[in-house]
Amino acid sequence: MPNLQKLIKTAVDKHGSQAKLATAMGCSQQQIAYLLKASSITAEMAMKVDEATDGTVSRHDLRPDIFGPAPQPNEGQAA
């Protein structure tokens, strides 16, 4: 499983900057900078990252202890 810093960096890269990700998440740029160094993330922040990245960085990846593993698409169904 990728670590938190790599996942947050992916979210930052998707938006182009810490400030733009922060705006999408409704928090400060300083909070994003903190997350890039943190060892854990709250469930609330994980949901905000998930929403801001349209699931590219999933809450399931950020907090599998709370949200469980990411759902797998059913085989045989059209995506």
Image (cartoon, rainbow, N blue to C red):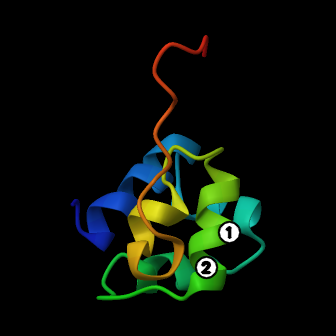
Occupied quadrant, residue 23: bottom right
Task: Return the residue nearer the eye: 44 or 14.
Answer: 44
Q: Residues within 10 Å of mark 2 (few under 14, many from 20)?
A: some
Q: Quadrant of the N terminus?
A: bottom left
Q: Is residue 64 left or right of residue 43?
A: left
Q: Is residue 65 visible?
A: yes
At a point 66% along the width and 44% down the height, the residue shown is 54
Residue depicted at 78% across the width and 73% down the height:
26
| Foreground pick, 24 / 45 | 45
Nearer-the-camera pick, 6 or 33: 6
Q: Which mark is residue 24?
A: none
Q: Is 70 located above or below residue 30 in the figure? A: above
Do the CB atoms of the residues marked 1 and 2 lie less than 8 Å apart? yes
Residue at image mark 1: 48
Judged from the image, the secondary structure of the residue bearing numbered disc 1 is helix
Counting from the top left corner in percent of width and height, residue 56 is at 51, 43
Residue 75 in percent (x, y) is at 45, 21
Question: How far from the left and from the top, in percent, is residue 49?
Answer: 60, 64
Please tell me which residue is depicted at 61% across the width and 11% down the height of the picture: 78
The residue type indicated by label 1 comes to Lys
Q: Using residue 49 as the reference point, say whether residue 57 is left or right of it.
A: left
Reading the image, the residue beneath label 2 is 45
For residue 8, say whether it is visible: no
Q: Where 34 sits versus 71, above or below? A: below
Q: Is residue 57 above or below residue 49?
A: above
Q: In which quadrant of the rendered image does the C terminus lie?
A: top right
How far is mark 1 from mark 2, CA to CA? 5 Å
Q: Amino acid at mark 2?
A: Met
Neighbor class of circle 1 (other Cα within 10 Å; few <14, some 14-19, many 20+) is many
The quadrant holding residue 47 is bottom right
Image spot of residue 12 (x, y percent)? 48, 55
List the single residue furthest toward the front.
76
